[in-house]
Amino acid sequence: MKKMICLLLALLCLVSLCACGGSAAPAADTAPAAEAESEAAEEAAEEVEATPEPVVMPPYEPFETPFGFQVEFPEEYQHLKGELAWSCSSFGYKEAHLSLYYAEVPDGEREAFREMAADASKNIDGWVPDWTRDYKNENIFDIVALKDDDAMVEYYETVTLVDFINDYFGEIPDEAMSTNVPFYMDTVALENGWKLVVQRNQLCTFAGEQLPIAQGLQHLSEEYREEALSLLENPDLLISGLKEAPWELPGQVGSKVSFVTQNLQGDTVSSDDILAGHKVTMVNVWATWCPPCIAELPDLEELNAAFAEKDCQVIGICADATHGDSLKEALQILGDAGVTFSNLKLNMDMMWANVNTMPTTFFLSEDGTILTDPVVGASIGAYNSTLSKALAQVG
């Protein structure tokens, strides 16, 4: 009986051991699988962490213009994937044109783009700015700023698309063809006398038919296209940001000028530096397309030598030598005329010199005060007599 009981106990122990062995084997197999899953999770986490975060750019500051108004960007403009930049041009003291561009700019280039755009916005250039040509871009809005010119404001407010196309393009090619034209949106009247005509860039046929806005954005990548379309469809956002700013008519006798620009060789020049040490500086504003301007350059070189004996000088501002071919042409003209006196580029710091008639010549004191009415037209006799008046004022 005892042997039977012992045999049964031994048999139970054997079954128990087999059972334990059977359950232990799968546990040993799951350990590597769990470890592999953990490693895969870590690798996935590393991949997520390696994905670069979108670049967060600082908010746009209000865009300051020298025309008596500024542009404050609304909240909706502050967190765009693309970049915004201004191009400015002016036609005389009382008219200015600004264009707002939207550009596709990769994250790694956005800071550099803003620096280029800020620098370019100081140049007076009526064409698409050079800095946009390396990027897909679209002109979003135009602002025509007019001072005390209700007739032109009425023109922009009432002109039909067909009339505008006829006025701008002359002979119409194929009426079914399309082109981008400025399409009137609204007028903002400021208390200081400026009226700001806001226009949206609109794709239209030459027959005057407005095409869908999105159709004019096909050159943009899809993700940027949607953002540009949103801006174009909400002009009120821009219009709400147009505010009056301090301004006075530039070029008046007694007003002071201050500027930082470049000479035609590309060196940075400030008014403080170039006017220093000269009782009077005669500033001759000229252009490469102006025959009388070019004809008088050798005489101005001689005049500069004579002025030096009186602690005075002549400098030039070439209105159209902003860049490219026009800059090369200006340098060639000056070289052919034997000019050695300094010539500067016209920019947005120098609205007093942005004149309609060439040449126009100003006389400045050492501190930048405009001493006399400008001399309009080429006249060596008038330059000499006006210098005498200017010298009498500075003593």
Image (tube, helix red, strand yellow):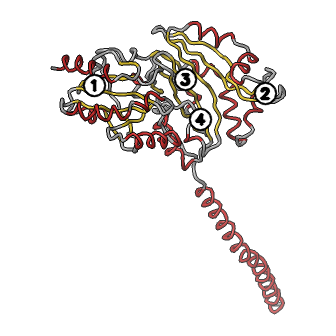
- Which amino acid is tagged 3? His
Nearest the viewer among 166 and 9 is 166
Q: Residue at x 52, y 28 (%)?
A: 88
Circle 4 sits on which residue?
128
The mark that comes first in sequence, 2 or 3, is 3
Q: Residue 134, percent across and down? A: 60, 46
Q: Residue at x 71, y 77 (%)?
A: 28
Q: Which mark is residue 97?
A: 3
Q: Nearer the viewer, mark 3 or mark 1?
A: 1
Q: Element under label 2?
A: loop
Quadrant of the snapshot with the N terminus: bottom right
Residue type, label 1: Gly
Residue located 56% across and 6% down the image: 150
Residue carrying label 1: 368
How far apart marks 1 and 2 lie (CA) works out to 51 Å
Residue of label 2 = 212
Instruction: Give above or below for 40 relative to 117.
Output: below
Task: Give the secondary structure at mark 3.
Answer: strand
Label 3: how many Cα within 10 Å (few below 14, some 14–19, many 20+): many
- Residue drawn at (39%, 45%), measured in percent from left and top? 265
Mark 1 lies on a secondary structure that is loop
Q: Amino acid at mark 4?
A: Val
Asked whether the residues under the numbered discs 1 and 2 touch, taking CB atoms below 8 Å apart as contact, a structural biologist would say no
Where is residue 11? Give x, y as percent.
Answer: 82, 86
- Could you tell which of marks 4 and 3 lies nearer the N-terminus? 3
Spatial separation of the CA atoms under disc 1 and disc 4 = 32 Å
Q: Residue furthest bottom?
A: 3
Judged left or right of residue 197, residue 215 is right
Q: Of marks 1 and 2, which one's residue comes earlier in the chain?
A: 2
Instruction: Tell me which label, 4 or 2, sits earlier in the chain.
Output: 4
